[in-house]
Image: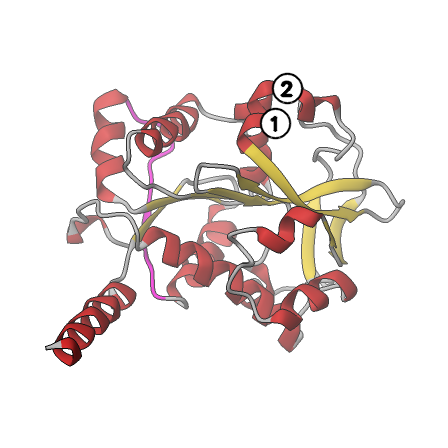
Amino acid sequence: MVAFAIFASLSVLAVALERRPVIGIYPTVAADNYLKASKEWLAQEGADSLELPESFNASELETLFQSVNGLLIPGGGRALDPSLRAMVNHAVMANRAGDFFPVWGTCLGFEWLVEIFGGTDAITDGFDANDLASNMTFTEAAKTSRVYESANPSLLQWLASEPITYNAHTEGISPESTAWGTTGLLDTFTILATEKDRNGRASVAQIEGKTLPFYANQFHPEKVQFVHGPWQPAIPRSAHAIAAARHLAQFFVNEARKNNHHNSAEFVV
């Protein structure tokens, strides 16, 4: 009887791990580049994706929200749309009501999440980190973070000592910014790591929600394997860079598997 119970539990776990969650991806400028790479980054770890419309009303928001198991905001270069802000706020309320719904922001997505919770002045310009491979400086919080809880012990060492994260930004937020003292950011996020640009100026590289399953990084893990071209020659391609990029995708996909929203096959891309 005990053996049967253990087998049944393992079977349930196996089914959960095999389930392909659907991640909603918000479209940004340069969609052919950023969206395609983000889809491939997620697909490699077992997720399907749904490209969300650029704008949607309140009733459409609820339909879209119930059709996906998580939200990814990729990089790009456009202004924050009210529809995306509304979906993030909807995700906050859903999580607080017990509906687990993860959100991930990359580069522009990172900046938008900082703006949503910290205000329009939280993100500043002047960072020289376009086409720059870098290493990260972890905070003490990284050691107990959810993002790195299951990481190979060597992974944090590689990220801290090797230039294996890829940056493509001139905007960001300094760890010394007064914006981190605002209630929105301070209460919502923990800083996991910082990075330095070419001039030695530090910016926040990675954050994690304190209670919300919200995650964001200023760097681009999806580009390591899935963006190719002479315009971004600094993208790291090493085995360690790939391992780090895949760890982050695997973590987020597993977070999305915890959500039980129904997925309509006609929506999946």
Residue at the extreme left: 1
Residue 53 forms part of the magenta stretch: yes
Which quadrant of the figure has residue 92? top left
Magenta-tinted stretch:
46-57
Residue at point 51%, 52% (across, down): 146
x, y percentage for residue 175? 75, 35
Residue linked to disc 1: 186
Color style of the picture: secondary structure
x, y percentage for residue 194? 73, 46
Q: Is residue 87 left or right of residue 264?
A: right
x, y percentage for residue 240? 65, 73
Image quadrant occupied by the C terminus: bottom left
Whether residue 231 is visible, yes or no, is no
Q: How crowded is mark 1: few (under 14 residues within 10 Å), some or many (20 or more)?
A: some
Residue at point 51%, 26% (across, down): 80
Q: How crowded is mark 2: few (under 14 residues within 10 Å), some or many (20 or more)?
A: some
In the rendered image of this protein, does residue 56 appear above or below residue 217?
above
Residue at point 45%, 25% (across, down): 81
Of the residues shown, which amino acid type is indicated by label 1? Leu
Marks 2 and 1, how far apart at CA: 6 Å
Of the residues shown, which amino acid type is indicated by label 2? Thr
Residue linked to disc 2: 182
Badges 2 and 1: C-beta atoms under 8 Å apart? yes
In the rendered image of this protein, does residue 101 appear above or below residue 225?
above
Q: Front-most of 147 and 196?
A: 147
